[in-house]
Image: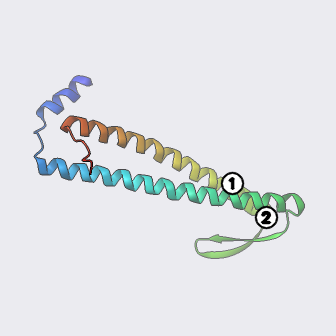
């Protein structure tokens, strides 16, 4: 498999300066987009955690207490014992997605670093 990759690189035509610059900017934008999405989802997971902490108290005192949950833009009346497990599942799903995106970010970052090394790209200090 390594020889196949080496042959593919040997056959690839060298990129012009403009193509290198376009690819560099594109990769930078991808990394920035992934970082932004990770931050957004981490914030959402933290919000879920705060709400869960509040609901844990209500769950211990009165599990049949009314609470409201926003589902697809509609405010639905439920009980704490119904909402808490769904909230936990949602938060766990968000954390799993954040973990996957973190892995993708690391892979893209390594790809970006190897691209910079391959073309000798160094940041310009001001």
Disc 2 target residue: 80
User: What color scheme is it?
Assistant: rainbow
Given residues 2 and 120, the one toward you in this image is 120
How crowded pointer 2 is (Cα within 10 Å; few <14, some 14-19, many 20+) is rated as many
- Furthest residue in direction bottom, as rendered: 74
Q: Position of residue 28 (x, y in %)?
A: 31, 51
Question: What's the mark number on residue 104?
Answer: none
Question: What's the mark number on residue 88?
Answer: 1
How crowded pointer 1 is (Cα within 10 Å; few <14, some 14-19, many 20+) is rated as some
Residue 117 versus residue 50 in the image, above or below: above
- Furthest residue in direction front, as rendered: 126
Q: CA distance from mark 2 to mark 1?
A: 12 Å
Q: Position of residue 32 (x, y in %)?
A: 38, 54
Q: Is residue 27 left or right of residue 97?
A: left
For marks 2 and 1, the one nearer the N-term is 2
Q: Position of residue 16 (x, y in %)?
A: 10, 46
Which residue is pictured at 18% across the width and 38% down the height?
119
- Furthest residue in direction right, as rendered: 61
Which residue is pictured at 87% across the width and 57% down the height?
60
Which residue is pictured at 83% across the width and 62% down the height?
58
Given residues 125 and 35, the one toward you in this image is 125
């Amino acid at each position: 498999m390594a020889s196949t990759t080496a042959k593919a690189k040997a056959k690839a035509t060298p990129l012009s300066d403009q193509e290198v610059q376009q690819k560099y900017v594109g990769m930078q934008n991808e990394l920035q987009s992934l970082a932004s999405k990770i931050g957004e989802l981490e914030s959402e997971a933290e919000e879920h955690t705060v709400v869960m902490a509040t609901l844990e108290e209500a769950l211990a005192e009165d599990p049949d207490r009314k609470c409201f949950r926003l589902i697809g833009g509609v405010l639905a009346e439920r009980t704490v014992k119904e909402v808490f497990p769904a909230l936990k599942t949602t938060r766990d799903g968000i954390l799993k997605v954040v973990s996957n995106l973190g892995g993708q970010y690391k892979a893209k970052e390594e790809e970006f670093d190897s691209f910079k090394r391959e073309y000798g790209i160094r940041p310009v200090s001001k």
